Amino acid sequence: MKALIASFLRNNSGATVIEYAAIASMISIVILAATFEIGGTVLQQFMDVAGAFAN
């Protein structure tokens, strides 16, 4: 039993999975923020073009 607990405490594979999940979540947050920023810029350009056609 003692050997099983020691083996469990030395196992780092769970920590690696958590680290990869944290990295993936940070990347997705950056992508989301960039998408919102680009979306606002693209919307303004479409509004400018629509305004040019309306006049």
Image (cartoon, rainbow, N blue to C red):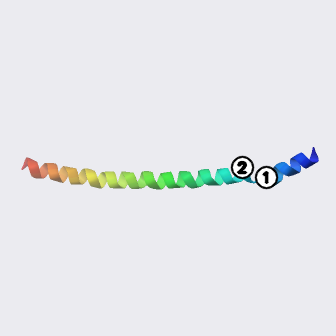
As shown in the figure, which amino acid type bears the numbered disc 1? Asn
Query: What residue is shown at x 72% (from left), y 51% (from top)?
Result: 13
Asked if labels 1 and 2 touch by Cβ distance under 8 angstroms, the answer is yes
Q: How would you rate the neighbour count of disc 1 (Cα within 10 Å): few for under 14, some for 14-19, many for 20 or more? A: few
* Marks 2 and 1, how far apart at CA: 7 Å
Q: Position of residue 55 (x, y in %)?
A: 6, 50
What numbered label is drawn on residue 45?
A: none
- The mark tally for this picture is 2
Query: What residue is shown at x 64% (from left), y 54% (from top)?
Result: 19
As shown in the figure, which amino acid type bears the numbered disc 2? Gly
Q: Position of residue 28 (x, y in %)?
A: 49, 51
Closer to the camera, 1 or 33?
Answer: 1
Query: What residue is shown at x 43% (from left), y 51% (from top)?
Result: 32
Report helix, strand or loop for mark 1: loop
Report helix, strand or loop for mark 2: helix
Q: How would you rate the neighbour count of disc 2 (Cα within 10 Å): few for under 14, some for 14-19, many for 20 or more? A: few
Residue 1 to residue 34: above or below: above
Closer to the camera, 33 or 9?
Answer: 9
Closer to the camera, 19 or 55?
Answer: 19
Say left or right for 33 vs 43: right
Query: What residue is shown at x 46% (from left), y 56% (from top)?
Result: 30
What numbered label is drawn on residue 14?
A: 2
Q: Position of residue 39 (x, y in %)?
A: 32, 51
Say left or right for 12 vs 51: right
What numbered label is drawn on residue 11?
A: 1
Q: Can you say which quadrant of the picture contains the N terminus?
A: top right
